[in-house]
């Protein structure tokens, strides 16, 4: 049985790709996306590495090479969602993380876990980004985590800033 989210099943989704040649951890990132026609796709993943992309953004792709996944070129319609990425230090255990996630959900935040210490936070358009940011800043100052925003570093692509 397929998982359904907002009326979309996984069968309605395709993979699109973002090149990240300057990223410290990966060379690119794939996203599930819903094809809208005319080389437009709606993203259905929270980004773990790419900058300037968010859940439900509508992007234009280059689909000219049938041997590759369509490559994201630009955001044509921002969704209003915002993404923060968090790395927890070892002493901030699973119970502490769960308590934090429960608190953040009150600000309209979904959590997508990469592993035990790395998560992406998806903040809804009507969520409280400032309160989430302030909470994470406080915890970062206490030395239990590091976090980053996913705002674009480059106007030309979704990668980290050029060296």
Image (cartoon, grey):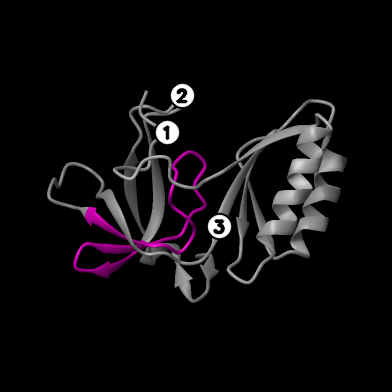
Of residues 34 and 153, the one nearer the viewer is: 153
Residue bounds of the magenta highlight: 34-61
Image coordinates of residue 93 in percent, x first then y, are 84, 34
Image point 75% across, 50% down: which residue?
134
Q: CA distance from mark 3 to mark 2?
A: 22 Å
Residue at 37% from the left image edge and 29% from the top image edge: 27
Residue at (54% x, 62% y) in the render = 81
**Numbered disc 1: secondary structure:** loop
Q: Is residue 149 visible?
A: yes
Where is mark 2, residue-wise? 24
Disc on the earlier residue, 3 or 2: 2
Q: Position of residue 152 (x, y in %)?
A: 43, 45
Q: Does the residue at mark 2 contact the one at mark 1 (Cβ under 8 Å)?
A: yes
Q: Is residue 151 left or right of residue 113?
A: left
Q: Are marks 1 and 3 in contact (CB under 8 Å)?
A: no
Give me the C-alpha separation between circle 1 and circle 3.
17 Å
**Mark 1 highlights which residue?**
160
Q: Is residue 53 magenta?
A: yes
Farthest-out residue, bottom: 7
Label 3: element kind? strand
Mark 2 crowdedness (10 Å alpha carbons): few <14, some 14-19, many ≥20: few
Give the tally of numbered discs. 3
Residue 131 pos. (x, y %): 75, 57
**Residue 112 drawn above or below residue 56:** above
- Give me the C-alpha separation between circle 2 and circle 1: 8 Å
Q: Residue 29 in the image: state x and y as whole percent.
A: 40, 40
* Residue occupying image coordinates x 27% and y 64%: 40
Q: Helix, strand, or loop for circle 2? A: loop
Which of marks 1 and 2 precedes in the sequence?
A: 2
Report if residue 116 is visible in the image.
no
Q: Is residue 107 above or below residue 149?
A: below
Tag shown at residue 82: 3
């Amino acid at each position: 049985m397929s998982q359904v989210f907002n009326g979309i099943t996984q069968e309605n989704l395709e993979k699109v790709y973002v090149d990240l040649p300057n990223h410290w951890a990966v060379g690119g990132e794939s996203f599930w996306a819903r094809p809208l026609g005319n080389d437009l796709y709606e993203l259905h993943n929270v980004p773990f590495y790419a900058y300037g992309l968010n859940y439900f953004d509508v992007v234009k792709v280059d689909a000219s090479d049938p041997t590759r996944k369509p490559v994201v070129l630009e955001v044509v319609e921002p969704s209003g969602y915002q993404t923060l990425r968090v790395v927890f230090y070892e002493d901030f255990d699973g119970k502490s993380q769960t308590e934090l996630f429960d608190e953040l959900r009150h600000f309209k935040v979904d959590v997508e876990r990469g592993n035990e210490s790395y998560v992406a936070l998806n903040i809804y358009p009507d969520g409280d980004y400032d309160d989430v940011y302030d909470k994470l800043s406080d915890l970062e100052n206490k030395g239990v985590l590091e976090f980053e925003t996913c705002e674009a570093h480059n106007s030309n692509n979704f990668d980290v800033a050029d060296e």
